[in-house]
Image (cartoon, grey):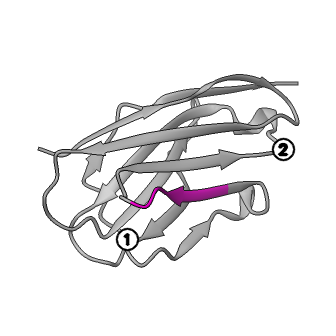
Amino acid sequence: QVRLVEYGGGSVQSGGSLRVSCAVSGYLGRIYCMAWFRQAPGKEREGVAVIDHYGSTAVADSVKGRFTIAQDGAKSTLFLRMNSLKPEDTAMYYCAADVTNSDCENYNIWGQGTQVTVSS
């Protein structure tokens, strides 16, 4: 059974940096894509960054130039490096996996989330 566990969230001042991580375990098949999403109170869930099994990445315009997604060599941990954080980055951050295909549109496995709070 696949398990995604996020960690590394916390509180930081505006302009600061933080790295959140997601440990991947229990899956024996192919994970086509992994992504970070976030959801702030009262707002819809937003896709932040994605990485496919080839290592190609993409980030949302709202975080471009500030956030970077990466995996370790064994693909057992997903990272999101967040620089120049802004108060509007405050949200619960979730990692998700798409084990369906390489379209990166069907995230059917989710972690429990880690909170990131940015103070002004």
Mark 2 or mark 1, which has the lower sequence index?
2
In this figure, which residue is indicated by the disc labeled 1? 104
**Neighbours of disc 2 within 10 Å: few (<14), some (14-19), many (20+):** some
Is residue 70 a member of the stretch shown in magenta?
yes
Q: Tell which residue pokes out farthest to the front in this image.
A: 73
> Foreground: 103 or 9?
9
* Residue type indicated by callout 2: Ser
Which residue sits at x=13%, y=58%? Answer: 28
Q: Secondary structure at mark 1?
A: loop
**In the rendered image, which quarter contains the N terminus?**
top left
The amino acid type of the residue labelled 1 equals Cys
Magenta stretch: give its range: 68-73
Which residue: 65% across, 47% down?
81
Residue 106 drawn in magenta: no
Q: Is residue 44 visible?
A: no
Residue behind mark 2: 84
Residue 75 drawn above or below residue 12: below
**Percent from the top left, x then y, of residue 33?**
37, 66
Residue 117 visible within the image: yes
Of residues 42 and 114, which is closer to you in this image?
114
Q: Is 58 above or below relative to 9?
A: below
Q: Are marks 2 and 1 in contact (CB under 8 Å)?
A: no
Point 18% across, 46% down: residue: 2
State whether the magenta stretch is mostly helix, strand or loop: strand
- Using the numbered discs, state the Cα–Cα distance from disc 2 to disc 1 in whole angstroms: 27 Å
Q: How far from the left and from the top, in percent, is residue 102? A: 32, 78
Residue depicted at 86% across the width and 31% down the height: 14
Q: Which of the 4 image quadrants contains residue 42?
A: top right
Q: Position of residue 97 (x, y in %)?
A: 32, 56
Where disc 2 sits, the SS reads: loop
- Tell me if residue 36 comes above or below residue 102 in the rendering: above
